[in-house]
Image: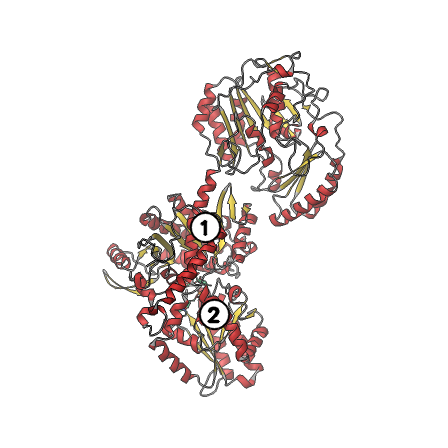
Amino acid sequence: MVMPANHFNGNSSLPAGRIQRLLRERELRKSHRAYYYSNESNRGEGIDVEQSILVEQYLEGASAAREGWEKPEGELFRQRLLVVANRLPVSAVRRGEESWSLDVSGGGLVSALLGVKEVEAKWIGWAGVNVPDEPGQRALTKALAEKRCIPVFLDEDIVHQYYNGYCNNILWPLFHYLGLPQEDRLATTRSFQSQFAAYIKANEMFADVVNEHYEEGDVVWCHDYHLMFLPKCLKERNPNMKVGWFLHTPFPSSEIHRTLPSRSEILRAVLAADLVGFHNYDYARHFVSACTRIMGLEGTPEGVEDHGKLTRVAAFPIGIDSDRFIHALKSPQVQEHIKELKERFSGRKVMLGVDRLDMIKGIPQKILAFEKFLEENAYWRDKVVLLQIAVPTRTDVPEYQKLTSQVHEIVGRINGRFGTLTTVPIHHLDRSLDFFALCALYAVTDVALVTSLRDGMNLVSYEFVACQGDKKGVLILSEFAGAAQSLGAGAILVNPWNITEVAASIGQALNMSAEEREKRHLHNYHHVTGHTAQEWAETFVSELNDTVVEAQQRYRQIPPHLPVEEAIERYLQSSNRLLILAIDTPDRPGGDQIREMDLKLHPDLKEPLKTLCSDPKTTVVVLSGSDRTVLDDNFGEYNMWLAAENGMFLRSTKGDWMTTMPEHSNMEWVDSVKHVFEYFTERTPRSHFELRETSLVWNYKYADVEFGRLQARDMLQHLWTGPISNASVDVVQGSRSVEVRPVGVTKGVTIVRILGEIVHSKSISAPIDYVLCVGHSLGKDEDLYTFFEPELPPDGTGITRPKFSDATRSSLDRRSGKCGSKTSQKPSHQRHTENKRNGNSNGNGNGNVNGNGNSNSNGVVGNGGRRSSSSSPNKITWNVLDLKGDNYFSCVVGQRRTNARYLLPTSEEVVSFLTYLSRAS
Ligand SMILES: O=P(O)(O)OC[C@H]1O[C@H](O[C@H]2O[C@H](CO)[C@@H](O)[C@H](O)[C@H]2O)[C@H](O)[C@@H](O)[C@@H]1O
Ligand SMILES: O=c1ccn([C@@H]2O[C@H](COP(=O)(O)OP(=O)(O)O)[C@@H](O)[C@H]2O)c(=O)[nH]1
């Protein structure tokens, strides 16, 4: 059999683009469906019950019940999929010490994975029973293995604290906008902490079981709010595992999520996954904005980026196995139920509610709206019945117990009010129905009423539509259910809190014309049958495989970790070292705004820095955007070089500040830029700006990120068309800052000046034979890292590389011995006035400090480092540096694409590295 090619091969190279691939997969699915229905036996005629109940067959291992997707060669490629969910799709009842009976519960997930032929799924989860003894565990493990299930054994206390407590009493209501439990504050905090500890412990236990069964190449798909810590636990055990996580509930607005005491730990744990999925774009957007607003991470169209590591975030709306429902309608069991129901409710329209008895489902609101409808429409009182199936759930949680009594009370009151001796308007069932009974109910229903206050998706609405092929009944659907996005066009959408509106919708639905019902139904039917659970699962797994390949490609562009030992070893072997510390306050918020606003030397760096600075073979340079006073305050006590405002001011801590600013430079732009910055600071809460001597920086890292970005965009537009349109300045955009500085000032350019000064003032007699350059610089200042490169490597990073070639190097050779204002170079911004709008700061596009190679320098460094004021610039040879290729260590802080050779992921690692270095020396 020739079927669509396998697209789950995780080792395959990535197709050109995501959209291209998704389009191709859509075509494959279409052809698969066409193939499937062209096969006689699959058309549904004469389908027998056993064949329609594929879920059970699937779990029994009979997945070949349907045609598989075969490769052309005839072989099935099957990637192993470990599905990890709190609950297994079977529940276990103990019959004896070593005997168990298993009851298969074919939930949505089982149906979904049933159709994914190219993965072989195994289930890992809790069997829903406490099994404290070893023989019992062994026997249950064996019994479950026959159903592709692997148990995680949770004891009663953990279940109570983790499942009833943290999952269902904290996360569940919070994610459905019902807030955190309103208890006595202290008690809540105490129980919150122990419940959170139990939650982490339970997630660790799941991770241990996954790890035990994991084989290389497997895909691990974690499900739901119960297992938000699992991605982190898994990656800690094996960083190479392919891990996806999908949330079945809504993810709330960041304003709700931020009330959760463990908000950041939870987000960070989820972000360890490779792919994070939600039912719709709203939930995905909320998640990304929680990560940006609460944790200060970067949200991109692809997902969330943390120090260069991207977690992909996307929407994958679940569906149902519609064929299973459509086929079941023809079964004798369902037909029998339909007959009974029709007789039982003849002469009355049937309205249906099917929900777990959960506060999110809005059952009281639904019943109250029905009461209002009866109240206002006496005609309908004996002509309509509401059947409410309320499946008991989480009965150990007090809130659910309260809800049961509340619903019973309302139903009793309404039935008392509108009932007769022979009939009642509401039939309320506190129990679940089997699959056939449920299908029959769906089929005989005239109006389905879904009034969830919040609902991740709501599969009941899909199932109702699938079973309405004949009747074409009306769906009244809450706009707060995820399903409203997909079935909104065909349904009557309501706000369940607006009882009057829901009551009116009931009237509208009952009175709707047959043509309108058909139109609406067909729209939804098309969606439900065209967006199945199988496709949902296929797409997620396929995206996860591709995400991992993409991540590998991206990692290749991130430099390797600094080889600490080698960097120290080479340092020790060198005799004339240069350490450049490019220090700025990071562009991302850390903790406290007031404490972080000014640059502060890490306290643990003081000792190491002292040691390094007092080594006569080592020259330390601090190069920063901050102004002179900040550098004086932090570094004045060390024996080092300071370069403030990106090199506009230089000093050895033994001497005075010198400026590279020309005496008569035009700084008229400062006032008007200041005026603009003040305006935006006033209008952007928690933004601030620094007025330095030669530059201004507006920083919005503590402000609302999205608002800050909008404000920055407005600011840039205003600056370019107004105050700086004729000034010799560069506008430098950071991820959360805007800086205006004189044109051509970059950290790389500054290095030229600094080297000249150092060489001159120290009268070094030997070339610098070791350079270590560590920092977190803006993209524009990346030239710092390339300056010392003997040759620029081919650019795989996509970052524009300034090329410091002969011209720059000779400008260093020709560097004036005096940097003071009287002898300063002619500033580049006097020569390049027009290049200021596009980041091409120096006008020659290559970061060359002198661009044209001219210099009015009157001193020269060269000839073994000795200053020779009489030498001709053109005769000087480059010999200040002798790095012998490998004695250069440029190192960026934070994982990202960069021109630096290496990276240190965090500032803490920089501190430890410099500490080791100082101790070694
Ligand atoms: O196992 P329980 O604690 O009794 O809860 C049952 C399931 O309820 C939740 O379902 C959600 O997933 C559906 C499918 O994606 C979605 O349509 C619905 O809106 C959600 O509420 C829960 O997320 C599951 O983990 C539970 O198993
Ligand atoms: O007596 C019942 C009532 C409902 N369901 C199933 O429970 C699921 C409910 O899913 P939904 O997404 O609507 O809400 P959830 O309960 O997951 O929040 C649906 O697949 C129903 O078919 C069931 O098996 N038996």
- Residue 112, can we see it? yes
Residue 595 in which image quadrant: top right
Q: Is residue 745 left or right of residue 192?
A: right
Query: Amino acid under label 1?
Result: Leu
Determine which residue is flagged by label 1. 275
Determine which residue is flagged by label 2. 525
Nearest to viewer (mark 1 / mark 2): 2
- When the figure is inspected, residue 882 is found, relative to residue 236, above or below; the finding is above
The percent coordinates of residue 481 (x first, y second) are 51, 65
Q: Quadrant of ligand 1?
A: bottom left
For the N terminus, the image quarter is: bottom left
Q: Is residue 492 left or right of residue 64?
A: right
The percent coordinates of residue 61 (x first, y second) are 29, 60
- When the figure is inspected, residue 912 is found, relative to residue 149, above or below; the finding is above
Q: Is disc 1 surrounded by few (<14), some (14 to 19) or many (20+) residues within 10 Å?
A: many
Q: Residue at x 64, y 18 (%)?
A: 814
Q: Residue at x 36, y 73 (%)?
A: 436
What is the CA distance from the residue labelled 1 to the residue labelled 2? 30 Å
- Reading the chain from its start, which is encountered first: label 1 or label 2? 1
User: Tag 1's secondary structure?
Assistant: strand
User: Tag 2's secondary structure?
Assistant: helix
